[in-house]
């Protein structure tokens, strides 16, 4: 397996950090490394400087022993401290090949690098049905076989059910504890995520944030159009000040999810 990124993004700085990630993961995992894949906005073509993360998936041959997980934690700390642009924007998971093929909530604890830079075992929720679909259909292969050979097809109704699950598991509790939504970044994320959820509930497909947002502006009309436009335009360092509106859109989306069942 080559230690170089074979399908780079259009961004040299991102390619550089992916190159370091692949080389380091290969050194730590050895024959356990089945493949490395890029997903999220960089794979879909919807990335934006200043707001996008670098989402990756590492597929392993089997469950990783504790000592390997500790080594990966140290590896990611070194990459984060490297000073490379985008090194602190990496976010990804390590999933065994057998567990990747289809989502099983009973086998959903996997090592993960979180967006805040911490590393540990995370429980993957219903969102990972949708993530599997996106990786299978859009994921960029940096090393290993094509993701379509590793993940079973996911049907439209599976995507709808997963969306309902995400809304109930992650977003409904935030109506009571909305501490995350106090930040403008998270308000923007919430609004655009609700657009994507509504799109999937209606169409049984997954759209990028920008496509879903523009669809929602037309589909939902004037009531939400201005909020969605502000969420699309938000950038780091700016203020959105849309807590109440964001909560209202979450409530509306949850109501639509209940009606769809």
Image (cartoon, rainbow, N blue to C red):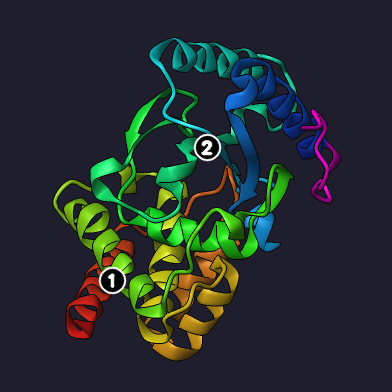
Q: Quarter of the image holding residue 255?
A: bottom left
Of callouts 1 and 2, the N-terminal one: 2
Query: Which of the pair 107/80 is nearer the observer?
Result: 107
Q: In which quarter of the image is residue 232?
A: bottom right
Residue 108 belongs to the span the image colors magenta: no
Tell me where residue 95 appears, x and y as whole percent. 46, 38
Which quarter of the rendering shows the N terminus?
top right
Where is mark 1, residue-wise?
Answer: 161
Of residues 73 and 239, which is closer to you in this image?
73
Q: How would you rate the neighbour count of disc 2 (Cα within 10 Å): few for under 14, some for 14-19, many for 20 or more?
A: many
Query: What secondary structure do most residues of the magenta stretch adopt?
Result: loop
Q: Residue 115: x percent and y percent?
A: 49, 34
**Residue displayed at 26% across by 49% down:** 105
User: Position of 216 compared to 10: left or right?
Assistant: left
- Image coords of residue 78 (percent x, y): 63, 12
Q: What element carries label 1?
A: helix
Please indicate, yes or no, whether residue 13 appears anywhere in the rendered image: yes
Question: Mark 1, residues whose alpha carbon is within 10 Å: few (<14), some, or many (≥20)?
Answer: some
Residue at the (50%, 63%) spot, across then down = 133
Query: What span is in magenta?
Result: 1-12
**Residue at horizontal 41 percent and vertical 76 percent from the top:** 155
Q: In this view, does 91 lie to the left or right of 157?
A: right
Residue occupying the point 22% across, 69% down: 251
| Residue 46 seen by the camera | no
């Amino acid at each position: 397996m080559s230690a170089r990124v074979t399908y780079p993004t259009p961004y040299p700085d991102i390619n550089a950090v992916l190159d370091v990630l692949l080389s380091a993961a290969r050194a730590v995992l050895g024959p356990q490394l089945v493949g490395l894949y890029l997903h999220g906005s960089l794979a879909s073509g919807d990335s934006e400087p200043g707001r996008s993360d670098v989402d990756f998936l590492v597929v392993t041959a089997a469950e990783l022993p504790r000592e390997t997980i500790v080594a990966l934690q140290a590896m990611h700390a070194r990459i984060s401290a490297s000073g490379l642009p985008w090194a602190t924007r990496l976010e990804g998971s390590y999933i065994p090949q057998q567990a990747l093929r289809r989502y099983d909530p009973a086998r959903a604890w996997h090592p993960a690098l979180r967006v805040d830079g911490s590393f540990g075992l995370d429980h993957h929720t219903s969102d990972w049905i949708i993530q599997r679909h996106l990786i299978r259909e859009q994921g960029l292969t940096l090393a290993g076989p094509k993701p379509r050979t590793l993940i079973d097809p996911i049907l439209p109704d599976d995507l709808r059910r997963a969306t309902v699950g995400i809304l109930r598991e992650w977003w409904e509790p935030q109506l009571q504890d909305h501490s995350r939504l106090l930040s403008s970044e998270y308000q923007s994320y919430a609004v655009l995520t609700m657009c994507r959820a509504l799109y999937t509930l209606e169409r049984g497909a997954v759209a990028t944030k920008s496509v879903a947002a523009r669809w929602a502006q037309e589909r939902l009309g004037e009531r939400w159009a201005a909020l969605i436009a502000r969420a699309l335009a938000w950038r780091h360092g700016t203020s959105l000040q849309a807590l109440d509106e964001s909560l209202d859109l979450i409530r509306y989306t949850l109501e639509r999810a209940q009606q769809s069942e």
